[in-house]
Image (tube, grey):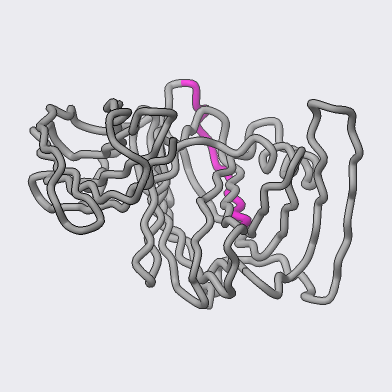
Amino acid sequence: MAAPSQRREKISPLVHKGIKMETQMHHTKIILSFLLLFVFCVYLDNVIQPSSVSIDQRFTITVNGTFDGTSDTLCGWLAMMLPLGVSVESIRYNTGNGFTELVRTTNDTIIENMRSSYPPDPNMDWLAFGTSPYQGITQSSYTATVYLFVTTASIPGSYLIDYRTGAFEREPGGYTIYYGDSILDQPLQITSGDIKETSPDFLPAYFSARSIGKEIELSFNLPKPTNVSLSLYSRSGERILSFQIFVPEGISHLKKDLSFLPSGIYFLKADLGERVVTRKHLILK
């Protein structure tokens, strides 16, 4: 349940309002739906955010919620209406079922839907991010840790932050977007003073990997510079290769050529110093 101070906008599970925009080739076809999904729902339980931050400060917001339902194709999304000049560096999703993902890229389609669906604010704008499909989830809690930075372009003042969430499905030529839940009007003060980051778990050691053509992109989020040892294993447990790379502090992305490997499922283990992380990886040719 949300904290009493967290205002919600109720959405009836029986209401389905669609706006279908047909476009020519190379444009996007969008179905905008207010619908409680029968196959995959995303709820917001509560949001933990600081009440005050300063310019040139990094801070974190924790979003807790629930995935409910099963789908092989639907993804979750999180949208936030933030003050201009506040950037999102990444979002780390962790679910009670053991799924984990580092999300770095905004979803422009959802951002445009937020802008067109809700009243604008000249000093704020929407940012939205989508997850990968979490296959096999029936019901699970999730935590989305949002890492933000207050740039020098930010304007000191008082703001009310809105959070909205739901699910979406990629289709040929567009998206189907479903709205699930909201928490609104969370107060945030931006000051020009010097407020130090106090979160003890800011930039925890994190690692993810994904295929880009014949390469694998390695993404890190580390609290300090680290010599990271990586090992790649076959599905049978045979170690295929090992290598070590130097990774600087913060968020970084590196690529490794794996074109010499046959298609299949592999496991990539990364020793981050403070913990060891193993990721399942699929190579397709």
Residue 7, horizontal then vertical, whole percent = 63, 66
| Apparent side of residue 260 relative to residue 36 in the rendered image (left or right) | left
Q: Quadrant of the C terminus?
A: top left
Residue at point 28%, 29% (across, down): 260
Q: What is the span of residues highlighted in magenta in the rendered image?
A: 153-165
Residue 129, horizontal then vertical, whole percent = 55, 44
Q: Residue furthest top?
A: 153
Measured along the vertical axis of the image, is residue 250 above or below residue 60? above
Measured along the vertical axis of the image, is residue 6 above or below residue 215? below
Measured along the vertical axis of the image, is residue 242 above or below residue 180? above
Residue at point 57%, 40% (across, down): 82
Circle count: 0
Residue 197, horizontal then vertical, whole percent = 26, 42
Secondary structure, magenta segment, majority class = strand
Residue at point 58%, 72% (across, down): 70
Residue 183, horizontal then vertical, whole percent = 60, 62
